[in-house]
Amino acid sequence: MQQQIKAVAFDLDGTLVDSALNFAAICQEIGWPAGTPLLEQLAITTDATSYQRAFDIIYQHEMAGAALATWMPGAEQCLQALAEQGIPIALLTRNMRQATDLTMQRLNMQIELVVTRDEFAAKPDPAGLLHIAQQMQIAPEHILYVGDYVYDLQAAKNAGMPSCLYLNDNNQHFSEQATWTIAHFDQLTANLTRR
Ligand SMILES: [Mg+2]
């Protein structure tokens, strides 16, 4: 892995941090069927009152999640190890900027290049990852995108980047779409910092 990877971009919720975001509860509160993709459904909600109500519920859940977020095991150490090796890192999230900033401040997360849905089209659109590649001046094929959901893998593929799926109890069926999988961040740290 480490020979072709020159930089690493990470997803936030469910990857670097456990924000305990309960997407099923958000759907239920809004009145959408469980599993509805929130941002995509919001984008096609044309009634102004319905839009504002759904927006507010999503906002409240994201801010509450940011206030409770904790590091995933080994994730903070992974970022430190990459920084020590001089490997550039970035963050791409479907979260909004305000909740992302709150999460990062609370956890003292040291990433300068941060892209949220407020700046670019949300994953699986590759726009955010392509912006990261451009800012880093590194070819997409040399940037690894690490995430926990199928949107992450699709966004990476759409951007021409290899992907790494951070496994949990609910996402193993996406493994075939990932370039690599890890069950713990220590595996990523070892793979990327081995000399
Ligand atoms: Mg995620």
Image (tube, grey):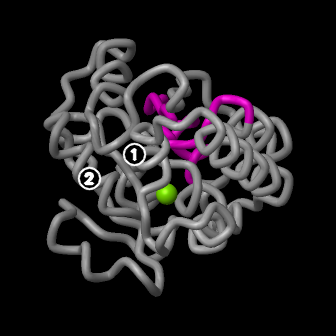
Kindly identify the residue that appears in the image at 51 percent across and 27 percent down: 115
- Whether tag 2 and tag 1 are in contact, CB under 8 A, the answer is no
What SS does tag 1 mark?
A: helix
Where is the N terminus found, in terms of image quarters?
bottom left
Q: Who is closer to the viewer here, 82 or 120?
A: 120
- Neighbor class of circle 1 (other Cα within 10 Å; few <14, some 14-19, many 20+) is few
Question: Which circle marks residue 163 in the picture?
Answer: 2
Whether 187 is among the magenta residues is no
Magenta range: 78-98
Q: Which residue reaches farthest bottom?
A: 169
Amino acid carrying label 1: it is: Glu
**How busy is the neighbourhood of tag 2: few (under 14 within 10 Å), some, or many (20 plus)?**
many
- Residue 191 picture location, percent across and down: 35, 59
Secondary structure beneath dot 2 equals strand
The circle on residue 55 is none
Residue located 53% across and 59% down the image: 15
Of labels 2 and 1, earlier in sequence is 1
Q: Amino acid at mark 2?
A: Ser
**x and y percent of residue 103 in the render?**
76, 44
Q: Number of marks in the image?
A: 2
* Residue, disc 1: 40
Q: Is residue 133 left or right of residue 168?
A: left
Q: Is residue 84 above or below residue 139?
A: below
In-image side of 102 versus 113 (left or right): right
What residue is shown at x 80% (from left), y 38% (from top)?
102
Which residue is pictured at 22% across the width and 51% down the height?
154
> Eyeballing the image, is 67 above or below 102?
below
Q: Tell me residue 164's x, y (percent).
A: 31, 58
Splitting the image into 4 quarters, where does residue 25 fall?
bottom right
As measured in the structure, the alpha-carbon distance from the residue carrying label 2 to the one carrying label 1 is: 23 Å
